Image (cartoon, rainbow, N blue to C red):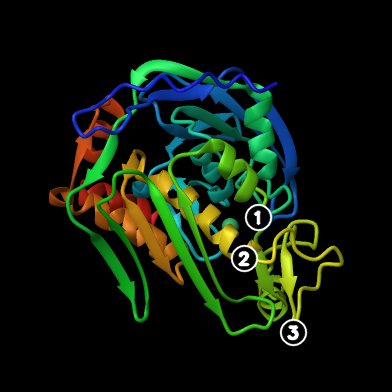
Amino acid sequence: MLLQSPDRREPTPGGVPLLKQRTIAEKVSCTGIGLHTGSPVQLTLLPARADTGIVIVRHDRGRSVEIPAHVSAVSDTRFATTLGRGEHTVTTVEHLLAALYGLGIDNARVVVEGPELPVMDGSAASFVYLVRTAGVFEQREPRGVLRFRRPVEVRDGSRWIRVEPAREFRVSYAIDFDHPAIGRQELTLCGHDPARFEREIASARTFGFLREVRALWDAGLAKGGSLDNTVLLDEQRVVNPDGLRWPDEFVRHKVLDLLGDLALLGVRIQGHVRAERGGHALHLALVQAILDSPDAWRIQGGGRLAEAVLATRQPEERAASRSA
Ligand SMILES: [Zn+2]
């Protein structure tokens, strides 16, 4: 079932291997329920040409609206990452984007019939399975990457996230919750390594606290939320009868969320991303800060996608999509 072709690496002036772009080998679909609406939703992944990037296609009352998976299209980050174009929005995109990013998929169309992606088991495992079922197709065009010359950092009080120059892609994440089941957890992930992503990150589930979930339910949100798709904590412990998949499943899920949010840069990075108690808003603030700091990096290996993505930085466009 795994059709992934071996890496064909080309040396670059920086000595770092340059990879080719990848898409999925064939169309594949699944159905699940939406976390917030609690309604069934169908999701279809389609192959896409090189330099397309990831494009969400929202089917709505006979119309199709294409929304690029790019930070310029982010309209909300409060409970999940929401992308929008005009009145058309798709929410809870981060776990699918993390799966595509973690498995090295650069180009794909994601067709969705409703306003949110299915939550599946609260992790990226089902989306990884979907991509593995379709197979991975290596394209001829090289993948451009951003190579950093200096750090870019965003802070929110004592919480922060930064990217530093490094010879490879690397993520180091730390969380610190005043909760007996979590406490401080740290994790480092090195390189774009699909097998390691699949083994150590993809199955880590969303988590939430009982008191906050009650507030969401009272607000009419998280209607599809259950112990089948969320690790739920009361004041002392994990409520789910089967417990955790790893003792540090929480920080693993944070890394998963971060990869999904980094995907919204639209181009991969060669650098060390370090986060101290991050979250979607902070992750996306870093992505925006990277785009706003063109002196901090250069594009290595070309790639029209990288050029195109980085050209979408007009403030008017961002303002328009944010207010949508
Ligand atoms: Zn998440």
- Residue at the farthest right position: 241
Q: Which residue is mark 3?
A: 236
Measure how far apart labels 2 and 1 are at the Cα level: 7 Å
What percent of the width, then of the height, locates residue 225? 74, 61
Q: Is disc 2 in contact with disc 1, using a CB cutoff of under 8 Å?
A: yes
CB atoms at circles 3 and 1 under 8 Å apart?
no
Label 2 neighbourhood size at 10 Å, few (<14), some (14-19), many (20+)? many
Q: Is residue 165 left or right of residue 105?
A: left
User: Residue drawn 53% across and 18% down?
Assistant: 5
Residue at image x 50%, y 39%? Answer: 193
Of the image marks 3 and 1, the number of the one nearer the N terminus: 1
Earlier-in-chain disc, 2 versus 1: 1
Q: Which mark is residue 215?
A: none
Residue that numbered label 2 is attached to:
250
Query: The residue tagged with tag 3: helix, strand or loop?
Result: loop
Circle 1 sits on which residue?
A: 204
Q: Amino acid at mark 3?
A: Gln
